[in-house]
Amino acid sequence: MAARAYWQGQIRLALVSIPVEVFSATKSGAKIRFNQIHEPSGKRISYEKVVPGIGPVDRDEIIKGYEISKGEYVLLDNEEIEAVKIESRKTLELVQFVDFCEIDPLYFEKPYYVAPKDDLAEEAFVVLREALRKSKKVALGQLSVRGSEKLVALKPCGKGLLLETLRYADEVRQGQAFFSEIDEGKPKKELLDLATTLIEDKSAPFNASEFEDRYVDALRKLIDKKAKSKSNKAIIEDDDAPTASGDNVIDLMAALKKSVGDKAKGKSAKKSSAKTTTKRRKSS
């Protein structure tokens, strides 16, 4: 089944317009969602709209309200909200270009793939992609879709483009408020060198497929096990992992030295094993 476009329109750079299609780059298929069930009957629970002291109410009696103080609301009906919605436009105007490193990762929200809509759009699309790549810049604009306006960044992605929605400034908390109590002093050189050695030893190119969500995997196995057993009894398996005990105060220097030493022993063991194997081959 072909992917459904999240948005169709045109990217505009000055007087150049490029028809494109935008597709979600992520999927939620791996997540496991639960429903709430009434255990005695095994039926799914539904919810009624109720008002304290009044009881259930009709859906057509419900309007939206914004709380301005405890228990005090500004009431808005659907017509008023619809009147201020941003009109969905079919044009994404590129209004600014910045270095990618200038955008703090905190602002990135969700990625989308951008592809030319047809063969006629391909030439201009490729020109824009390669111009961004050559200048090492990211294009910024605001995308109007589904009644709201999203700040977006556009950059090259293989043979296509990647559009990422960005959070607005008032949606991001400033981290310095959380870090103010941390000592500004620098660590001892020996500690820093040991930690750097560990980092270098574990450095490798990023490959997302090497990581798995162990919680989701365990949930799936549990669901399969219960489905096959056709039992509603709880299945709880003990975790064999040892629990931490004793003093939590750790000698940082000793721990780092031991970690580096264990890595070095592992490497030397591998080398000696390889040498032994080579000697055996020669003697045979």
Image (cartoon, helix red, strand yellow):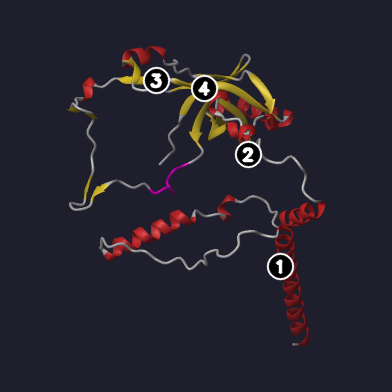
Residue found at x 51% / y 66%: 241
Above or below for 275 versus 192 = below
Number of the label disc, if any, that sits on residue 262: 1
- Of labels 2 and 1, earlier in sequence is 2
SS under mark 2: loop
The total of numbered circles placed on residues is 4
Quarter assignment of residue 256: bottom right
Residue identified by numbered label 3: 69
Q: Which residue is mark 4?
A: 143
Amino acid beneath label 4: Leu
Q: Secondary structure at mark 3?
A: strand
The mark lying in front, picked from 4 and 3, is 3
Which portion, as a residue range, is magenta? 27-32
Estimate the spatial distance between the alpha carbons at disc 3 and disc 1, rounded to whole Å: 59 Å
Q: Are marks 3 and 1 in contact (CB under 8 Å)?
A: no
**Residue shown at the point (23%, 39%) measured from the top left:** 46
The residue singled out by tag 2 in the image is 158
**4 or 1: mark nearer the eye:** 1
Asked if residue 67 is positioned above or below residue 244 in the image, the reply reads above
- Is 30 within the magenta? yes
**Quadrant that contains the C terminus:** bottom right
Could you tell me the amino acid type at mark 1?
Asp
Q: Position of residue 272 (x, y in %)?
A: 76, 76
Whether residue 56 is visible, yes or no, is no
Q: Earlier along the polypeptide chain: callout 2 or callout 4?
A: 4
- Residue 217 at what x, y percent from top left? 44, 57
Mark 4 vs mark 3, CA separation in Å: 33 Å
